[in-house]
Amino acid sequence: MIGGSVLLQLLDMTVEKIRDLLRASPFQSFEVYTPDGRSFKVPHPDFAMLSGTGRLLHVARPETDEEDIIDVALITDIALPAKTQK
């Protein structure tokens, strides 16, 4: 079992990684994955935000007026699109 301080460090690293991705210039879309196998695509920084504490990630769905709210502690992976060869 992982101790509480280690979990907080992992959460802080995930929050910082998401903040870095949202602030990147140029922005690159990314996806976050949860333990139940779902994925949430962030196509543009306008479609995502972290709550004030960084505990929740809000991801808007561009094709609807809905949003997903994800507990950052439950994010298992963050993926960037593969780079294409020129």
Image (cartoon, grey):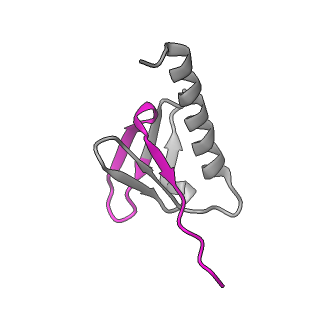
When the figure is inspected, residue 22 is found, relative to residue 28, above or below; the finding is above
Question: Per the image, is 49 magenta?
Answer: no
Q: Position of residue 42 (x, y in %)?
A: 48, 57
Residue 44 to residue 32: above or below: below
Residue 79: percent from left, percent from top: 50, 55
Quadrant position of the C terminus in the picture: bottom right
Q: Residue furthest bottom?
A: 86
**Residue that lies at the very extreme toward the front in this rendered image:** 1
Residue located 68% across and 55% down the image: 24
Whether residue 29 appears in this view of the structure is yes
Q: Position of residue 35 (x, y in %)?
A: 33, 40
Q: Which residues are magenta?
A: 59-86
Check residue 76 for magenta coloring: yes
* Residue that protrudes farthest toward the left in the picture: 36
Picture layout, residue 51 above or below residue 83? above
Q: For residue 9, which quarter of the picture?
A: top right
Q: How many marks?
A: 0
Write the residue at 35% across / 49% down: 67
Q: Give the vertical position of 66 relative to 13 (above or below).
A: below
Q: Is residue 57 left or right of residue 27?
A: left
Q: Is residue 52 something one can see in this rendering? A: no
Residue at x 40% of width, y 62% of height: 62
- Quadrant, the N terminus: top left
Q: Percent x, y for residue 60?
A: 41, 53
